Every structure is written in C-alpha cells, then in structure tokens.
Image (cartoon, rainbow, N blue to C red):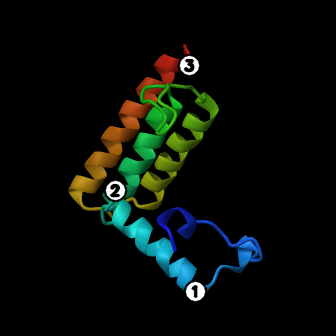
C-alpha cells in the first residue's frame, strides 16, 4: 500500500469502523511525529499559561500564524489557574507554588492591560 493511501479509509469501510491495526498504525505515527514532555503539575500549568497568552493575543495561535484576542476565554483560563491554586494549597512543593503564583500574577496583569 502506498504511503499516500495508507491514511485514507477504503471506500467500502466506514471511517468509524477502523480496525485495531489501523488505530495502532495511527498511534505509532503520532508517537514518532513529536516527542511530548512528561505531564506533571508544572507542565500542565505551563500549558494553561501558554493557552492564556494566546487568548490574550500575546502569542500567535499555533497553526494560524496570527494573534487573536479572546478575553473571555483568557479570563476563564486564568480562573482555572486560580482554582488550581486554591485546590492545591499546602499540597505543592515550593517551586510549583512559586511558579503558579508568578504565572497567575503575570497573567492577571496582562489581562488588566488588554482589557483597558
């Protein structure tokens, strides 16, 4: 089977009826494309921070190559980080706590600046 046809569903097969082998092949291709960092609390918070920076129009949207603002979504992401801070109180190490506090402060200041 050519590389071109490998990702296409045969005409007589419903795309929702992919075989186990098809799913395994797709998973293998996804895993070799870009190695992802291990997920822990810090990478999760950094991911939310990056999302908020995109939503504030500070960073370009991945894939779109342009900056767009969505302040309502940015506020929601900041609120999620604040909720994490509250729910993880006294349960983080010093570095995690400091990082979360710093990110929240910076995002809140950027939000106020963009809102004005």
Q: Which residue is mark 1?
A: 20
Callout 2 secondary element: helix
Up-down relation of residue 17 to residue 107 (above or below): below
Q: CA distance from mark 3 to mark 2?
A: 27 Å
Where does residue 65 sit, x and y in percent of width and height? 47, 30
Q: Position of residue 110 (x, y in %)?
A: 43, 25
As drawn, which residue projects farthest toward the left?
95
- Residue 20: image location, x then y, percent: 58, 86
Query: What quarter of the picture does the C terminus occupy?
Result: top right
Residue position for label 3:
115
First-in-chain label (3 vs 2) = 2
The residue tagged 2 is 43
Residue lying farthest to the bottom in this orientation: 20
Q: Is residue 13 left or right of residue 66?
A: right
Establish if 77 lies above or below 14.
above
**As drawn, 82 above or below 22:** above
**Residue at the (50%, 72%) spot, across then down:** 26
Q: Tag 1, which secondary structure?
A: helix
- Residue 60 point in image, percent of width and height: 45, 30
Mark seen at residue 87? none
Residue 39 in the figure: left or right of residue 16: left
């Amino acid at each position: 089977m050519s590389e071109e046809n490998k990702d296409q569903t045969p005409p007589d097969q419903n795309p929702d009826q992919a075989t186990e082998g098809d799913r395994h092949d797709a998973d293998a291709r996804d895993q070799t494309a870009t190695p992802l960092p291990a997920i822990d609390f810090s990478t999760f918070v950094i991911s939310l921070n990056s999302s908020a920076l995109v939503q504030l129009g500070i960073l370009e949207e991945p894939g779109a190559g342009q900056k767009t603002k969505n302040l309502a979504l940015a506020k929601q992401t900041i609120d999620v980080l604040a909720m994490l801070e509250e729910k993880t109180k006294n349960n983080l190490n010093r570095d995690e706590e400091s990082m979360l506090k710093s990110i929240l402060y910076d995002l809140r200041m950027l939000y106020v600046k963009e809102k004005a």
